[in-house]
Image: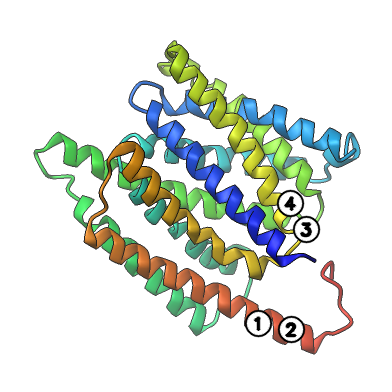
Amino acid sequence: MNPLKGIALKVSAIALFSVMAALIKATASDVPAGQAVFFRSFFALFVIFGWLIYRRELPRGLRVQNGMGHVWRGVIGTTAMAMNFAALGLLPLPEVTAIGFAAPLLTVIFAAMFLGEEVRAFRLSAVGLGLIGVTIVLWPRITFFDADQASALASLGVMLVLGSAVFRALAQIHIRKLVQTDQTSAIVFYFSLTATGLSLLTLPFGWVVPTWEQAAMLTIAGLIGGFAQILLTSCYRFAPASVVAPFDYVAMLFALLIGYVWFAEIPTKQMLIGATVVILAGVLIIWRERQLGIKRGRARPGITPQG
């Protein structure tokens, strides 16, 4: 274990994902979300495939036991990605990031519903606090009956981010099932492959011929996304999940910086307050998970991480 290296890899991955989101946002006014998903997924495949060759995990690393599980994970994850990309064209980057933090909160609820995980009062209270924070962020945007078209589009963006958070949480539930039977390399690879195929189904619905600049940004976004995924996967080899998980919220700092410098987006006071509440709730959940993990380890000292 090398916790500092694990943290460095996690922060680097979050930074790259933030840059990827900015590149998608920069093209979102002209390029449909489905087409952006294609670039993000297709070019990521080259990076992921190269990583598997480097690690000598071919073909062993691509063998699966739960084929339909990968299909469902791909459908759900691709839907989440498309909704998030569409929202990036309608809302400021920091706002999309802040509302997107609802995903790990919803994962706690879905884990109790679908996996039978025990969720006690502390974590439920933290989830409730986080959802209050999300409500603070999105409340000014809920204006579907406003005559202003810009307000209506912003409200649509909020709905898309919330929908994306729901599907991301569901994708995490599927991943928790998949890791019990299949390797992480297979999960990463088949998701990108499935997303590439599904994105092609949107071709009849308005794909455009991007400019050279747009094509370059989308291609770079795909390559960066693939590389970021590798860093994210690798960080868990050097540090426990409980150590690196809090650094997910560094994404808010990157979003604020990139949004201000690149898109001249100035966050509102209400958005910052809501984001702070959501982050606090997430950190409380992570802390509680860590405490429970320590207790379980003391109770079962002979059990390995694999069970």
Q: Are marks 1 and 2 in contact (CB under 8 Å)?
A: yes
Q: Are marks 4 and 1 in contact (CB under 8 Å)?
A: no
Residue 220 appears anywhere in the view = yes
Q: Amino acid at mark 2?
A: Arg
User: Which badge, 2 or 4, is on the more N-terminal residue?
Assistant: 4
Q: Amino acid at mark 1?
A: Leu
**Percent x, y of residue 68:** 72, 41
Considering depth in this image, is 293 or 108 the residue closer to the camera? 293
| Residue that numbered label 2 is attached to | 296
Q: Amino acid at mark 3?
A: Arg
Closer to us: mark 4 or mark 1?
4
Q: Which mark is residue 234?
A: 4
Considering depth in this image, is 186 or 16 the residue closer to the camera? 16
Residue 160 appears anywhere in the view = no
Q: Are marks 2 and 3 in contact (CB under 8 Å)?
A: no
Q: Is residue 247 above or below residue 167?
A: below
Callout count: 4
Q: Amino acid at mark 4?
A: Ser
Q: Tell me the distance, in whole angstroms, between the alpha carbons under discs 2 and 3.
A: 21 Å
Q: Tell me the distance, in whole angstroms, between the alpha carbons under discs 1 and 3.
A: 21 Å
Where residue 49 sits, quadrant-wise, is top right
| Residue that numbered label 1 is attached to | 292
| Residue that numbered label 3 is attached to | 237
Structural crowding at the residue carrying mark 3, measured as other residues with C-alpha within 10 Å and reported as few (<14), some (14–19) or many (≥20): some
